[in-house]
Image (cartoon, rainbow, N blue to C red):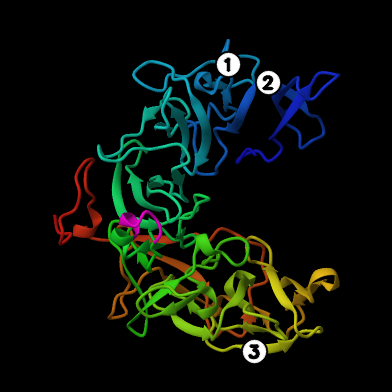
C-alpha cells in the first residue's frame, strides 16, 4: 500500500504459461485508481514495496520520488538466491536501475526488504555463509551499510526488526539458539547506520518473536521481557527453563527499570505468549495499558496470572481482576472489556473509569470458552465481538457474541471532560521528561461520565523542551556503558 495515496496498491502474484504450474514467474501488479484497473508491472520479482510505504517516510523534502518502488529481483542471468539484486523505478518499471548500496557499488544476494517507519531496510546474504548485511536508507536514494559492534554478527533467520520510531531502528539479534533462544536489543542512530547495544538477554521464541512492545503513540516508552538466568540457559544448551522478568524504559532503551505494583515487581506475558489478537498491551488511548501477569520474582504460567491496568503508560500498575482474562479497549480508552480466559465463562466485565471499578454482564450462553475478544484496530468503536466455543470434538459449537455500549445513558464528552495528561510524572507529581521533552496529551478524565463517540484521530502530543541530563546522552558506536551506567 502507498501511505500517501490509498488508490495505489501493489499485488504480488504469479503468471504461468498455459500447460503447467512449473513454468510460473513471480509477478508484481499495480492499481493506481483503487482497483478500477490493474496492470502488470514486472516479472521475476521477489517482493516489492513503495518507498513511501509508511506515513513517516519521506523520499525528499518535496517528495519528488513519491512514486518510487523498490523490489528484490532475480539475477540477470541466474535464478540463484546469491544473485538476487535490488532494483528501483520511479515510473512503474518503464525504466529501472540498480542502486549503489555500498562504496559506490551494487550488491547481490538481497533476500528481503522492509519499510520501517522513517527508513527502508534491505538484507543481503554473502555467498556460502549465513551471515547477513543490512543496508539502510532514509530517503530512498542514498544507502548505507548498517554497522554493528564488532562482537555482533547478523545471521539469516536470527534477527528481528522490531517496532521502531521515526528517529531510530530497533533490531533484536539472536545470540542463543533454540530450543530456548535469547537475543540482544540494538538501537540505531538517527540515520539508521550505527547500532549500539541497548539490553542483552531479551526473551525470544523459535518463530523469531521478541517480547518487545512500544507503548502506543508515546515517544520512548517500551516494555520488554529479559531472561534473568541467562548464564544457566546458555550453558545448558537450552535445556534449562528461563526465569523471565519484565522491564520498562522511558528513554527508548538507554535505561530500564522494573514494572511495579505497590513497590512489588510485576512481570507480564508478552508477544511470545500472546493470548488474543492485535497489540499485546497498549491502546491508541494515551497511557492506557492492560496486561496479564503476576507479582513476585519471575513470570509464572499464564493461568497463574491476573489482569493488571496502568493509566500512566506503565509507570505504575494496579490489580484490575483476579485470574487471566482476554481484554480490549473501546471508545479511545473510555471502555475496558474483559472476559475470563482460564476456562468456561458466564459473563463479561467492563470498566468506564480506567479499570478502577468493574461491572458484570451475563452472557446469553453459559460456560463458553473465550477464543478471541475483538474490536476495531483503532479502538474507537463502542462495539466488541467475542468469539467462543462450547463442548468438544464432534459436539463442539462455536459462538459469536456482539457487545454494544452505544445505548448506554452516558452522553458525548464535552471539553471540560478532558484533561492534559503528561506521559511521565515525577514522584512529586510534577511533569517528567521523556526523550528530552515533557509530552502531554488531551485525554478523557478517568471519572468523566461520558463517551468520546468520535472517529479515530492520531493523538497529537504537545511538547515542552527539558534541560539535558545524563540520561539524554547515548554511547557512540563501539562504546558501552560502565557498570554503574554513569560513563
Q: Split into 4 quadrants, where in the image is the N terminus?
A: top right
The numbered mark at residue 359 is: 3
Q: Split into 4 quadrants, where in the image is the C terminus?
A: bottom left
The numbered mark at residue 116 is: none
Q: From what the image shows, is residue 482 above or below residue 365?
A: above
Residue 200 seen in the current view: no
Q: Are marks 2 and 1 in contact (CB under 8 Å)?
A: yes
Q: Of callouts 3 and 2, which one flags the residue occurring earlier in the amino acid sequence?
A: 2
- 451 relative to 389 in the view: left or right: left
Of residues 269 and 95, the one drawn nearer to the viewer in this rendering: 269
Residue drawn 15% across the image and 55% down it: 482
Residue drawn 79% across the image and 22% down it: 16
* Residue 371: x %, y % from top left: 70, 70
Q: Secondary structure at mark 1?
A: loop
Q: From what the image shows, is residue 91 above or below residue 158?
A: above
- Identify the image quadrant of residue 33: top right
Residue underneath mark 2: 42
Of residues 58 and 315, the one drawn nearer to the viewer in this rendering: 315
| Residue range (magenta) | 233-239
Residue underneath mark 1: 96
Residue drawn 78% across the image and 29% down it: 38
Q: Secondary structure at mark 2?
A: strand
* Residue 352: x %, y % from top left: 60, 83
Tell me the crowding category of disc 1: few under 14, some 14 to 19, or many 20 or more residues within 10 angstroms, Cα based: some
Residue drawn 76% across the image and 19% down it: 23
- 274 relative to 204 in the view: left or right: right
Amino acid at each position: 500500500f502507498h501511505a500517501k495515496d490509498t488508490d495505489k496498491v501493489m499485488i504480488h502474484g504469479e503468471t504461468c504459461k498455459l500447460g503447467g504450474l512449473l513454468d510460473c514467474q513471480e509477478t508484481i501488479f499495480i492499481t493506481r485508481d483503487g482497483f478500477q484497473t490493474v496492470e502488470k508491472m514486472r516479472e521475476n520479482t521477489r517482493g516489492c514495496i513503495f518507498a513511501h510505504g509508511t506515513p513517516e517516510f519521506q523520499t525528499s523534502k518535496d517528495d519528488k520520488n513519491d512514486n518510487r518502488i523498490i523490489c528484490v529481483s532475480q539475477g540477470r542471468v541466474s535464478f540463484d538466491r546469491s544473485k538476487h539484486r535490488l532494483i528501483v523505478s520511479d515510473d512503474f518499471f518503464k525504466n529501472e536501475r540498480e542502486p549503489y548500496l555500498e562504496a559506490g557499488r551494487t550488491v547481490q544476494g538481497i533476500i528481503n526488504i522492509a519499510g520501517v517507519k522513517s527508513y527502508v531496510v534491505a538484507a543481503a546474504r554473502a555467498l556460502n555463509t549465513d551471515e547477513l548485511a543490512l543496508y539502510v536508507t532514509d530517503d530512498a536514494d542514498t544507502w548505507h551499510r548498517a554497522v554493528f559492534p564488532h562482537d555482533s554478527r547478523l545471521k539469516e533467520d536470527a534477527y528481528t526488526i522490531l517496532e521502531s520510531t521515526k528517529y531510530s531502528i530497533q533490531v533484536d539479534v539472536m545470540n542463543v539458539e533454540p530450543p530456548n533462544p535469547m537475543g540482544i536489543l540494538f538501537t540505531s542512530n538517527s540515520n539508521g547506520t550505527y547500532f549500539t547495544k541497548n539490553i542483552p538477554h531479551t526473551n525470544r521464541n523459535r518463530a523469531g518473536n521478541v517480547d518487545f512492545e512500544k507503548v502506543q503513540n508515546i515517544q520512548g516508552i517500551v516494555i520488554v521481557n529479559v531472561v534473568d538466568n541467562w548464564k544457566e540457559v546458555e550453558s545448558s544448551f537450552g535445556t534449562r527453563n528461563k526465569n523471565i522478568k519484565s522491564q520498562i524504559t522511558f528513554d527508548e532503551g538507554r535505561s530500564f527499570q522494573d514494572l511495579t505494583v505497590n513497590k512489588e515487581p510485576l512481570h507480564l506475558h508478552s508477544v511470545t505468549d500472546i493470548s488474543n489478537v492485535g497489540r499485546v498491551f497498549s491502546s491508541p488511548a494515551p497511557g492506557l495499558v492492560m496486561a496479564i501477569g503476576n507479582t513476585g520474582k519471575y513470570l509464572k504460567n499464564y493461568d497463574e496470572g491476573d489482569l493488571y491496568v496502568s493509566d500512566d503508560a506503565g509507570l505504575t500498575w494496579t490489580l484490575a481482576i483476579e485470574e487471566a482474562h482476554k481484554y480490549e479497549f473501546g471508545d479511545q480508552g473510555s471502555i475496558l472489556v474483559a472476559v475470563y480466559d482460564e476456562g468456561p465463562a458466564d459473563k463479561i466485565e467492563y470498566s468506564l473509569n480506567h479499570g478502577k471499578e468493574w461491572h458484570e454482564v451475563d452472557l446469553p450462553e453459559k460456560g463458553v470458552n473465550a477464543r478471541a475478544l475483538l474490536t476495531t484496530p483503532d479502538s474507537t468503536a463502542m462495539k466488541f465481538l467475542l468469539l467462543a466455543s462450547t463442548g468438544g470434538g464432534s459436539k463442539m459449537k462455536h459462538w459469536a457474541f456482539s457487545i454494544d455500549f452505544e445505548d448506554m445513558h452516558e452522553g458525548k464528552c464535552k471539553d471540560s471532560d478532558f484533561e492534559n495528561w503528561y506521559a511521565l510524572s515525577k514522584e512529586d507529581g510534577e511533569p517528567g521528561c521523556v526523550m528530552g521533552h515533557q509530552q502531554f496529551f488531551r485525554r478523557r478524565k478517568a471519572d468523566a461520565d461520558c463517551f468520546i463517540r468520535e472517529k479515530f484521530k492520531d493523538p497529537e502530543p504537545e511538547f515542552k523542551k527539558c534541560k539535558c541530563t545524563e540520561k539524554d546522552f547515548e554511547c557512540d558506536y563501539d562504546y558501552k556503558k560502565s557498570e554503574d551506567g554513569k560513563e
